[in-house]
Amino acid sequence: MMQAVAHRANVSDMSPAFLSFADQAIYLAHVSLGQHAVIQVLWRYLRPVDIDALTRFRDNLAHGDLARLIRPARLPFGRHQWASAPPPSAALVAAETALAPEAIQTWADAQVALPLDLVHGPAWALTFQGFADGSTVVSLVVSHCIADGLTIAMAVSDAVRGERRPLSYPALCSVHSAATVLAAELQRIVRDVPATFRALGQLARTAYTSLDTSNTPAASRVGPAADDQTVVFPSAFIRVPMSVWDAGARSRGANRLTLLTAMTAAFAEALGRVRDEEVTLLIPVNQREGLSHTGGNSVALATLKVRVDGPRGGLHALQRRLRATLLQTRREPNRLAALLPLVPFVPRRAFSAASHLALGALADLPATCSNLGGLPKDVLQIDGNAADRICFRGIDRPVARRAIEARQGVATLFAGVIPGFVALSFVAYQPGVVTEPRHLRALVERLLADYELVGEFFDA
């Protein structure tokens, strides 16, 4: 059943909707670093798509959780606000020329580079392309500042079913006076005072305890081969039959998530992302409380160290450690979360320096293991019928080679469960190991063989 959308005449009367500290931090990192992270969803149909149905899907997306922009604060220490985005005005248009099937990856990468504007819109883009073998690929690219993978999956599912979530955000062009906006921001600053003082106390304690432990290795210098040419991180998309994946997990005494974690560790090792014979895994942990969550991002990062000689054998010990780490992360906010109330008070220049420092502190060369879990089957049905392939990936828009090499590369394994399959997206850039998609594809093929898994690439 179609849900009602907030009436445009009443939008200007809505109360301000402030970003969470975490969402504001992500936005400020984007602004200060100029590195814009996005989530891309790709669907492949082995036939032409129903353009009318795809247009209805696009219009439904424009009235859901993706229909928002960010209104920067007017006060120096104010909180940014969500604003309701106007719906798209341009029609979906089919490309005149079909591309060779070998160009699927190149086309998908080009969609990541499409312009997105978080303040004026649009903050997401839906496009599609036909290929000479009769297939069609649809791409949805969404700024990570307004939504994470789970939010996007829920928005897609709602749009497929024709459900439109009423937004409680003022319109971008609302008639609120400057005085009203400033008053609301000032009231919010006052309400945030207790959290700000708690964060200052945490900052003092953290600084004190770090005096004798500041021995994190510095980031490596950028090599002479690095330049300002922009690159899109190489990616490889593959799906593994659920029966094969589950058999591989059972044979190692593990569950699906533990096998994914072990594979991420082996992926990091193959890239050379090893420190002191261990790989460091960053695992996003969902912090939402039910479906009423309306923020853009709501995850905590669990950190797990894995010895490189462990992942390929029995996984009993890894499963126990993984379970304990995830439970602890859900129960106890990390120190970074406790400091987030200070975000509005950090000047842009200092925030840029802090962001670069944070990137430089990633000297453990971590790899991210991001698991969306089970996805509803309607996520496949954006033109009314199920797509033949689907994949998700989190990726930065094109960045300068110099910047990514200063960051010492990147490695992410993104996973989701669809009917009958585990969909895997590998993203990596590692100087001297993986700098092009063909390098990554070969590495993924070897990794699957090591785990006695068989799969099908997205463009197969």
Image: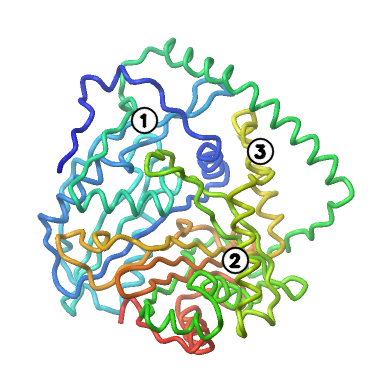
User: Residue 207: which quarter of the image?
Assistant: top right
**At x 41% / y 54%, what residue is drawn?**
149
Amino acid type of disc 1? Answer: Ala
Q: Position of residue 456 (x, y in %)?
A: 35, 82
The residue tagged 2 is 367
Whether pointer 2 and pointer 1 mark residues with C-beta atoms closer than 8 Å, the reply is no
Give the mark nearest the N terminus, 2 or 1.
1
**At x 18% / y 77%, what residue is drawn?**
132
Which residue of the protein is positioned furthest toward the top in this rendering? 179
* Viewer-proximal residue among 382 and 178: 382
Amino acid type of disc 3? Answer: Ala
Query: Is 360 above or below relative to 15?
Result: below
**At x 21% / y 53%, what residue is drawn?**
160
Query: Is 149 above or below relative to 420?
Result: above
Q: Is residue 302 left or right of residue 396?
A: right
Q: Position of residue 256 (x, y in %)?
A: 48, 73
Closer to the observer: label 3 or label 2? 3
Which secondary structure, mark 1? strand
The residue tagged 1 is 83
Give how far apart the Cα atoms at labels 2 and 1 are: 34 Å
Query: Is 232 above or below relative to 193?
Result: below
The residue tagged 3 is 338
Check the picture and name the quadrant holding the C terminus: bottom left
Give the mark nearest the N terminus, 3 or 2.
3
* Residue count near mark 2 (Cα–Cα under 10 Å), binned few <14, some 14–19, many ≥20: many
Which secondary structure, mark 2? strand
Amino acid type of disc 2? Answer: Ala
Q: Position of residue 152 (x, y in %)?
A: 36, 51
Q: Is residue 450 left or right of residue 111?
A: right
Which secondary structure, mark 3? helix
